[in-house]
Amino acid sequence: MRRLFFFILIAISIKSASASNADSALVEHTSLEKLTQLESLRNPALHGIGYQMAFSQLALGLDLQRQSAAFVPEQGNGFTLPYLKVNTYRHLNGRSTVWGEASYTTGRQHGIKWNSTSDYDLLQPYILADTLGGDTRRERYTISGGYATQLSQWLLGAEVHVRAEQEYRGHDPRMRGVVTDLTLRLGGGYDLGTYRLGTAVEGNIYKQTNSVAFYREEGVIPEYQMTGLGTEYSRFSGDKRSIYYDGGGLAILLHAAPISDCGVFADITLDEHRYHRKLAEFNSMPLTDLYNEHVGATIGWKRDNGYRLATFAHVDYTRRTGNEHVGGTSDARYFPVIACLTMYKSRMLDCNLSALYGKKNWNVVLTAGYESQSEKYIYPHRQMDASHAYGKLQGQCFLRPSGKLLLTLNAQASYYASVDDKLQMPFANMGEGISWLIRHKHEFAKANYTDFGAKVRADYAWKQSQYGLFAQVGGGMTLCSASEHQTLLQCSIGITF
Amino acid sequence: MKQFFQFIIIVLTLAVTACAPVEDDIFTTAHITVATSEELVITRVQAQVKLTNVNTRQVTTSANFEGPGVTVELLRGAYQIDIEGVATCQSPDGATVMRQFRCQSDYAECISKEQNNVTLNMIFLD
């Protein structure tokens, strides 16, 4: 599998080599200016005309994160993830464009607690969990490719993205999560007068098999089928350690933007994903269903007249609804579902206002926003809320110390100030371990955060050659008012072509 | 172009109608009646009923008997029911007798959104 994957990486690298002005292409592909097109570039039809210049890159890198105490215990207190990644974007002719990406990531996730399931962000709170946890090993393969073409006023495009991932632990409790995630996107666009309209439909299929094994009989501990805010499905917790997730969803993307670089632009994204947790050892009895519904909208105005100016407002609203299946009396390891109750509700809101100002070689983005999250377990009532106001400043600069060398500097700083928080829990009826988890999570959810980071990239290009070398190093630090901190190191080297 | 806007209206309609199925009617009432096969009329019950949710192991208790029955508000689901206490009964000859009893059921479904009626047979302990 690994050899086949490397063969694909190399094949893509060779095939996509093309003559291009690598420096200008890098500026175009990495400029902060693209923030205004972030949503529209998800539409493959518009992605095909999103960049004028071809750009390909092969990178070998390392992402390293450490937290002095886990901000979210289920996600651990850091990771060490080396990766190899190749991506390419090229125009076949005046009308058609292809792009692709392949990557292989392997490494460790450190200090995970109360989670034995992969893709926590996607599937929480419906996870398998135990009190012990520990480091896990991760291996992730991704491959994606897209094609777009222009037929007079119409733009058409398609894109596919595949992720295969496994996460496992080599000591008890030996969790294992094997993920397959396939996304297909079809998009269209139409030039109407001075405006370009676009729409895309995205379909997703998601599977994960998840199990926990113990090799030492005397060290067996219960695995809990978590149902939100520290609750668990007691009947199927304990020794039921083999589950799987069956999911998928649909998304619809709508865009309108001026064909020129001046005017009002707007994007709307609607998506709904559902994930069913099933008990493998009891005839695939459904335990829980999680529904993630998201609406995102952006409206803004931009102008490029020697200098770039854009202001835009963005809103993200996510509603997570969890249904629990009530199992009836068993008959030969078959449990009928006698009722389905909505027990978990979560609402997340993020709205912000951004202003971008820049010239050819530099950009500055200032963002101010408000985010809130409210989680509820209906009965017995549990609630955890937190909201923050935040400000963020990003800067980017492209420097050319010599004809062959291009330096890209990125820096950002942000501050998240807690506005409001709430915690209602029946602590008197909760176990010690789960009480610690809830108090810890709330402590970090309501904290103030100061975050700053910088990244430097040096690109060296040979004259008369389509190839170049690059090295990138970046670092960041997050200071939390709960007297803890996080450090991040990102470095990579590679070639551009 | 007209087809383009029609397509957008269709996909938006699909998006709006594809919302998560929400079941907010999570509570119900269970009316539990104790009964006996002996020729006794149960006039008063002093007992505690304990309902343990089979799936969540959550326990609901009540002692508010009215005659031979008690009404309990609880989460819809499957329950294990235990009752233990004293019943005041009237025998066919008109005499009033106090009987110590218990009732037990390993599995009773209380999933209807309306009232769920459960009848349990008394096991006399004296």
Image (cartoon, coloured by chain):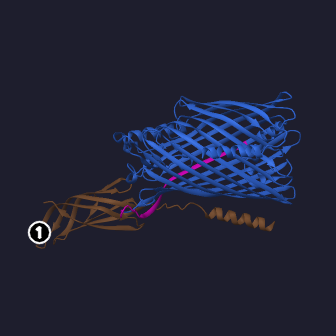
Chain colours: A blue, B brown
The spot of residue B120 in percent (x, y) is 26, 66
Q: Where does the image place residue A40, in percent across and percent down from the top left?
A: 75, 51
Quadrant in which the C terminus of chain B appears: bottom left
Q: Is residue A220 left or right of residue A107?
A: left
Residue type, mark 1 in image: Ala
Badge count: 1
**Residue A116 visible here:** no
Specify the principal SS of the magenta part. strand
Residue at label 1? Answer: B95
Q: Chain of mark 1?
A: B
Q: Residues within 10 Å of mark 1 (few under 14, many from 20)?
A: few
Q: Nearer the viewer, residue A287 or A186?
A: A186
Q: Is residue A251 magenta?
A: no
Write the start and end of the magenta stretch as one range.
Answer: A329-353
* Residue at image point 52% right, 54% down: A245
Residue B29 position in % (x across, y down): 37, 63
Looking at this view, name the residue that lies furthest to the top: A401
Image point (77%, 37%), residue name = A496
Q: Is residue A51 left or right of residue A449?
A: right
**Helix, strand, or loop for circle 1?**
loop
